[in-house]
């Protein structure tokens, strides 16, 4: 649903699915019964359309306008086909499914409703007394077809459509009046603080990019107020009619909270703007483990009969719709909190969510980003450096031979036919395993895909037949693994590599690896109007542009730090290294001595970032075995929210000695934490952050050697330095902060690494164990500059 001026636009599909839905949530029905397959469905659509002859018009754009008080409601979509033969007119709605179409006794209600909408629009525009509405179901594997037809008089369609619209008008009226008040409030809104140095230019660049429908990359230091600086101009662009909805995209929960706080601050200054924070299903579910069916969950039974009332209530009472408010209203109306949350998103002005909900093909919000869908959306991508690796994960898929055998053991007694399909896939994987010594690139995997397609269809029939058995969850997880693998294969292009690998565990897998996600991300970004990528560590900018956006006209902006450089000391040690070949007790003792020197120069809290847990443990054991010289806190490999909060609470404790918090680079405490003032006065970074050598990194290096002649930089140096910069960014968070950054690896003094430093690091100083203490004391004894 989209508001444009005095016009509210809604697709036929979204309209009928929203108004006509009813009954239970039930995930025991496999996906084939509830969705049309994606790329495979589109291909089969085209194939069926071509068979229908010269009288059949495919993909016919249709729309109908309903005038309401003060605004127009425009309903639009594309009929899959219109066949005119003599006096007969057939409106065809095609649905590709994986299920056995012979099991269908009648068309699914919403599918028939789509056809009836198109039938009404066409009959009205052509002056027809009657049309035949047809729903065509086609099995995506066998291409077996089943059609359902009903003849409808124009008066019958008109009356039916009038009732449909009557149910929707109250929602359209809400959208219209909400947008009027929103835009009026934005027009009067002012930036809530005096602009810091560089902040006004940043906001202006965001506004310019969005009004020109361009993409913008922003490298801006921590502490400049990036969130408010990108949100405020985006609101201004929305208020002036350049966009319709804000998507604030985050990689971690903590940055989501920052976005919520920024909007709440602006609301206190007069902003009339509703937003919802989408939380993962596992964190919203009332059950210990999500089981979305009416037998396991009382909220699932009749959910769709109650959820529209719940949505209408919350959007009339709340503005900043948080997890807590969603849970409260979901309990009041007895609905699934997660599905409720997704429905709320259609009636708010801003959505704060994880990257997945826009980019991940398995998770993305289909109501906004289904095939062919687009809107006047502004995407604000926070901590955008994280998107590269996250996107590689989203668009890649793996299948392990051991998974196939495990499922075969589960089902062989229940379904010999499925067991045979599994065995066929297993034999293909066994042959690939015999040809693989450690890892091996493959030119294609077509023979495996053919076997998996047959397996997927049989697996779906099995899950639909056996709704309840102890190992069903394991079988269902495998179903989704196969589904993801098949869907990923459809995306393969020159940015992918296929390889097999023997894992350390002894397992064997085949991987469809998205080396460069630029094309997949680009298709998603095209569904919005403008995107702003911003981060404190978006360096080097050309690297991220080559991986995140495929537009030559993209803008870039480098924002200088507004904080006095005199308040920050950066030292790089030339007599220590973390290179694998040099690791040993001698180097570990040097690292520990540097930590002691830093902590001894001024009492306070320090964070020490290590390249791995193993490295951290070696230094930690040396510290424990020697005389106690400071308090040491250590990050554990698995820390829940409570443990994380307890760890950070140690920085607020008063103590008579320095604290060194041992952490892992790129881990839980590398970004998204805000320890201002005396809570943190120094960061020590051990090593250059290079990723571990493994098959995936080797494939990345070879790909970029072929494409850019810079394989080592793209696969190792750039990601490594990003971790370093993230760790260093924990200190100096505000204009009143003062602190030190100590880089422990002689490679930081090499030209190729120094070229990756932010411009503000031009004053980095070279030290040794003999000179570091003197440099630190000189800094702490020097004058403090108030920002």
Image (cartoon, rainbow, N blue to C red):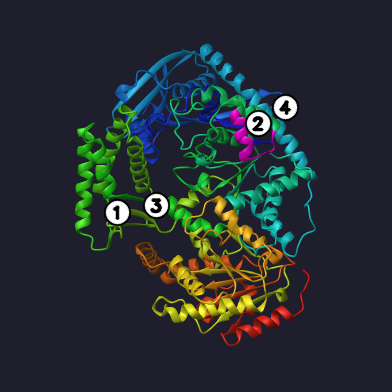
| Residue 65 place in picture, x, y as percent | 61, 26
Q: Are marks 3 and 4 in contact (CB under 8 Å)?
A: no
Is residue 552 visible from the viewing direction of this image?
no
Label 4 vs 2, first from the N-terminus: 4
| Residue 489 place in picture, x, y as percent | 34, 48
Query: In whole angstroms, how far apart are the C-alphas of marks 4 and 2?
Result: 24 Å
Q: Which residue is mark 2?
A: 314
Segment tinted magenta in the rendering: 318-331
Outermost residue, bottom direction?
A: 770
Judging depth in this view, the residue of 14 and 760 nearest the camera is 760
Q: Which mark is residue 509?
A: 1
Choose top left, top right, bottom left or bottom right for residue 466: top left
Q: Nearer the viewer, mark 1 or mark 3?
A: 1
Query: In whole angstroms, how far apart are the C-alphas of marks 1 and 3?
Result: 13 Å
Label 2 vs 3, first from the N-terminus: 2
Label 1 vs 2, first from the N-terminus: 2
Q: Are marks 1 and 4 in contact (CB under 8 Å)?
A: no
Q: Which mark is residue 680?
A: none
Report the magenta stretch's main SS.
helix
Label 1 vs 3, first from the N-terminus: 3
Judging depth in this view, the residue of 196 and 402 nearest the camera is 402
Asked if the magenta segment contains residue 325, the reply would be yes
Q: Nearer the viewer, mark 1 or mark 4?
A: 1
Q: Which residue is mark 4?
A: 70
Instruction: Give the secondary structure at mark 2.
Output: helix
| Residue 146 place in picture, x, y as percent | 32, 23
């Amino acid at each position: 649903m989209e508001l444009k001026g005095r016009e509210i636009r809604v697709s036929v599909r979204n309209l009928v699915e929203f108004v006509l839905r009813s009954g239970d949530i039930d995930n025991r029905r496999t996906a084939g019964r509830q969705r049309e397959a994606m790329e495979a469905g589109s291909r089969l659509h085209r194939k069926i359309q071509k068979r229908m002859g010269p009288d059949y018009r495919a993909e016919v754009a249709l729309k109908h306008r309903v005038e309401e008080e003060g605004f127009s409601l425009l309903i639009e979509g594309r009929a899959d086909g219109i066949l005119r033969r003599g006096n007969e007119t057939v409106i065809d709605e095609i649905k590709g499914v994986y299920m056995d179409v012979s099991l269908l006794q009648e068309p699914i209600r919403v599918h028939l409703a789509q056809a009836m909408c198109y039938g009404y629009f066409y009959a009205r525009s052509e002056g027809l007394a009657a049309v035949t509405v047809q729903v065509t179901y086609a099995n995506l594997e066998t291409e077996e077809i089943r059609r359902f037809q009903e003849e409808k008089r124009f008066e019958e369609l008109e009356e039916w459509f009038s009732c449909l619209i009557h149910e929707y008008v109250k929602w359209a009226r809400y959208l219209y009046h909400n947008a009027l008040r929103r835009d009026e409030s934005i027009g009067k809104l002012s930036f809530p603080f005096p602009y810091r140095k560089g902040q006004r230019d940043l906001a202006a660049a965001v506004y310019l990019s969005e009004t020109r429908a361009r993409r913008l990359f922003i490298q801006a230091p921590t502490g400049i107020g990036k969130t408010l600086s990108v949100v405020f101009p985006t609101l201004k662009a929305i208020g002036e009619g350049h966009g319709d909805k804000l998507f604030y995209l985050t990689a971690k929960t903590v940055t989501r909270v920052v976005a919520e706080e920024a909007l709440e601050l602006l609301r206190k200054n007069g902003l009339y703007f509703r937003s919802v924070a989408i939380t993962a299903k596992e964190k919203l579910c009332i059950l210990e483990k999500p089981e979305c069916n009416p037998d396991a969950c009382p909220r699932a039974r009749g959910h769709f009969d109650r959820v529209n009332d719940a949505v209408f209530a919350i959007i009339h009472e709340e503005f900043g719709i948080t997890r807590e408010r969603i849970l409260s209203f979901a309990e009041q109306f007895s609905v699934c909190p997660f599905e409720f949350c997704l429905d709320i998103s259609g009636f708010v002005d801003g959505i704060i969510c994880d990257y997945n909900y826009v980019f991940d093909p398995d998770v993305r919000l289909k109501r906004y980003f289904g095939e062919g869908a687009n809107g006047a959306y502004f995407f604000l991508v926070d901590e955008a450096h994280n998107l590269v690796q996250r996107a590689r994960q989203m668009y890649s898929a793996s299948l392990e031979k051991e998974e196939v055998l495990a499922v075969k053991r589960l089902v062989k007694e229940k379904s010999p036919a499925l067991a045979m399909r599994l065995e066929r896939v297993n034999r293909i994987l066994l042959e690939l395993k015999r040809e693989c010594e450690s890892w091996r690139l493959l030119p294609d995997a077509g023979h495996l895909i053919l076997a998996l397609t047959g397996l997927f269809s049989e697996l779906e029939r099995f899950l639909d037949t056996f709704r309840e058995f102890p190992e069903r969850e394991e079988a269902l997880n495998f179903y989704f693994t196969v589904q993801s693998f098949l869907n990923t294969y459809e995306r393969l292009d020159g940015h992918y590599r296929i390889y097999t690998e023997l894992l350390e565990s002894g397992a064997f897998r085949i991987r469809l690896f998205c080396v460069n996600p630029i094309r997949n991300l680009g298709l998603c970004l095209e569904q919005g109007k403008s995107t702003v990528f911003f981060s404190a560590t978006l360096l080097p900018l050309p690297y991220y542009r080559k991986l995140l956006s495929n537009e030559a006209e993209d803008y870039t902006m480098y924002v200088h730090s507004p904080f006095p450089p005199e308040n920050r000391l950066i030292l790089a040690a030339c007599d220590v290294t973390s290179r694998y070949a040099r690791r040993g007790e001698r180097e570990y003792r040097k690292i520990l001595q540097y930590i002691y020197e830093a902590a001894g120069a001024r009492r306070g809290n320090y964070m020490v970032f290590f390249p791995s847990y193993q490295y951290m443990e070696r230094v930690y054991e040396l510290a424990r075995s020697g005389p106690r010289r400071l308090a040491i806190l250590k990050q554990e490999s698995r820390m829940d929210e409570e443990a994380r909060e307890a760890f950070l609470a140690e920085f607020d404790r008063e103590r008579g000695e320095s604290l060194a918090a041992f952490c892992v680079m790129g881990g839980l405490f590398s970004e998204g934490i805000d320890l201002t003032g005396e809570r943190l006065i120094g960061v020590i970074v051990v090593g250059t952050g290079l990723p571990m050598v493994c098959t995936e990194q080797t494939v990345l290096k070879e790909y970029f050697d072929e494409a850019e002649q810079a394989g080592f930089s793209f696969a190792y140096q750039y990601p490594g330095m990003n971790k370093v910069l993230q760790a260093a960014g924990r200190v100096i968070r505000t204009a009143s902060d003062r602190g030190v950054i100590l880089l422990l690896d002689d490679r930081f003094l090499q030209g190729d690494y120094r070229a990756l430093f932010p411009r503000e690091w031009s004053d980095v100083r070279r030290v040794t164990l003999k000179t570091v203490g003197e440099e630190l004391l000189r800094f702490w004894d020097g004058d403090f500059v108030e920002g």
